[in-house]
Amino acid sequence: QVQLVESGGGLVQAGGSLRLSCTASGLVFSSSFLAWYRQAPGKEREWVADCTRYDSTNYADSVKGRFTISRDNTKNTGYLQMNSLQPEDTAVYYCKMRWFGNEYWGQGTQVIVSS
């Protein structure tokens, strides 16, 4: 059974930083595609960043230069380092992994950025 567990969310002032973690079990982490999404109140879930098994990364324009996605295959954990956070970054952040064509989601972690 595949399980993704996010952590690291919280309340931070504008300009601050947080690092989110996504720890996976039940799949071969090193062979899996990793992505982060977020969903703000009243809005649809949106893609934030992704990282292939070959460590190729992509970012949404809204976070480019501020957020960094990474992975540690030895720990089965993906990360999203978020710097220069702004109130518009407030959302529930979800990690998603894709392995052998199947997609798996974590339960989400709340990030609140106060102005």
Image (spheres, rainbow, N blue to C red):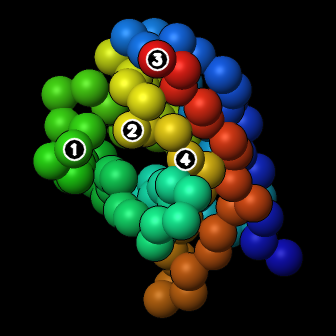
For marks 3 and 2, the one nearer the N-term is: 2
For marks 1 and 4, the one nearer the N-term is: 1
The amino acid pointed to by label 3 is Ser
- How far separated are the C-alphas under marks 1 and 2? 10 Å
Q: Nearer the viewer, residue 86 or 17?
A: 86
The amino acid pointed to by label 2 is Glu
- How far separated are the C-alphas under marks 1 and 4? 14 Å
User: Where 84 sits versus 55, above or below?
Assistant: above
The amino acid pointed to by label 4 is Ala
Image coordinates of residue 51 in percent, x first then y, are 33, 52
Q: Which residue was labeled with disc 1?
A: 62
Q: Which of 33 and 90 is in front in this view?
A: 90
Q: Which of 64 and 30 is in front in this view?
A: 64
Circle count? 4
Q: Nearer the viewer, mark 1 or mark 3?
A: 3
The residue carrying pointer 4 sits among few (fewer than 14), some (14 to 19) or many (20 or more) residues within 10 Å by Cα, namely many
Q: Which of marks 1 and 2 is in front?
A: 2
For marks 1 and 3, the one nearer the N-term is: 1
- How far separated are the C-alphas under marks 2 and 4? 8 Å
User: Taking 58 as reference, is 78 left or right?
Assistant: right
Q: Which of 69 and 60 is in front in this view?
A: 60
Q: Which residue was labeled with disc 3?
A: 115
The residue carrying pointer 3 sits among few (fewer than 14), some (14 to 19) or many (20 or more) residues within 10 Å by Cα, namely few
Q: Residue, x 60% and y 31% (percent of image)? A: 112
User: Where 59 sits versus 66, above or below?
Assistant: below
Image coordinates of residue 37 in percent, x first then y, are 46, 58
For marks 4 and 3, the one nearer the N-term is: 4
Q: Which residue was labeled with disc 4?
A: 91
Marks 1/2 in contact by CB < 8 Å: the verdict is yes
